[in-house]
Amino acid sequence: MALKFDTRFDPAYGKGVTVAPDVLRITAKNPSPFTFHGTNSYIVGCETLAVIDPGPDDEAHLRTLLEAIGTRPVSHIFVSHTHRDHSPLAARLKQHTGAAVLAEGRHRPARPLRTGEVNPLDASADTDFVPDIALPDDMVIDGDGWAIRTVLTPGHTANHAAFALEGTGILFSADHVMAWATTIVAPPDGAMADYMTSLDRLIERDDRLLLPGHGGPVTEPRSFMRGLKTHRKMRERAILERINNGDRTIKDMVEAIYRDTDPRLHDAAGLSVLAHLDDLVARGLVHSDGAPAIGGIYSPAT
Ligand SMILES: [Zn+2]
């Protein structure tokens, strides 16, 4: 089945949109080629609330969140991962509400930096973030009329978590699965093998509705995620084909494989190809001169 992205989305900046019973979505005004219209924060509950992904450190967004919260207490702030468009506002929202901040852990790369490698993702990482409570996989936090289960989904980042709203079939999928585009999986922060394992895990869960960190809901999660999986497998095959046909550098592969993609995204595409190559070299399907790196030379495995 062909993968179909859904790019219809009204961010409705400055106000909350009810997306499910007792679930309000508030989109921060930080649009970009990577964040689509901006980061979605979610407010869960009716009386004592939870906030999922407070968003970027943005004054207007904080004001909108506090207006939507009103006089109601907030007991928990859940953070899906430590990118600057998701976690930084947690600290100020905590100051205002006194809520505990929960996340898998601090920012860390999925693999160590290799000799001579600079981390191109440093600017996007919120390295200051420290959760009050570190969430292990499958932990259920009971709130006031809601319960949220941690579903660890590494891949986009090593500490990425999705959150299931127990008893509703709703999963807050953050940046792991989004309706509008594929997820960026870029080493060293992200890892393709982890991403694929996490995708399989969500396919098995069979949730009814995914509410992502950017853009609108995924209304048929299982078939959509199967499509995502096929898409990655096709990309992997395309990379193998380019190498078998003589491409040796990531730059050449990106120019061929992503010729229809916005050139502003070509650096990110290069990292995505590197993510596949990390995985392909580890599986013995591609040879690289030394550990896979963005400037590496790749050739068919013999
Ligand atoms: Zn992210």
Image (cartoon, rainbow, N blue to C red):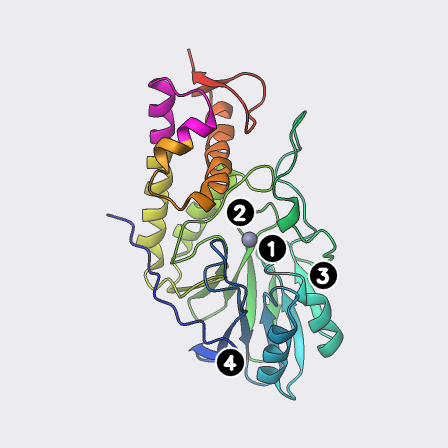
Identify the element where label 2 is drawn.
loop
Q: What residue sits right under mark 2 in the picture?
A: 156
Res 299 quadrant in image: top left
Under mark 3, the amino acid is: Ile
Q: Crowding at label 1, few (<14), some or many (≥20) Cα neighbours within 10 Å?
A: many
Residue 246 magenta-highlighted: yes
Q: CA distance from mark 3 to mark 1?
A: 14 Å
**Residue 300 image position (x, y, % from top left):** 41, 16
Query: Which numbered disc, 1 or 4, marks the residue closer to the eye?
Result: 4
Q: CA distance from mark 1 to mark 4?
A: 24 Å
Under mark 4, the amino acid is: Lys
Going 68% across and 66% down the picture, which residue do you hit? 90
Q: CA distance from mark 2 to mark 3?
A: 21 Å
Under mark 1, the amino acid is: His
Question: Mark 4 and 2 residues: CB-CB less than 8 Å, in contact?
Answer: no
Identify the element where label 3 is drawn.
strand
> What secondary structure characterizes most of the magenta part?
helix
Res 211 quadrant in image: bottom left
Q: Which residues are magenta?
A: 237-253
Q: Crowding at label 3, few (<14), some or many (≥20) Cα neighbours within 10 Å?
A: some
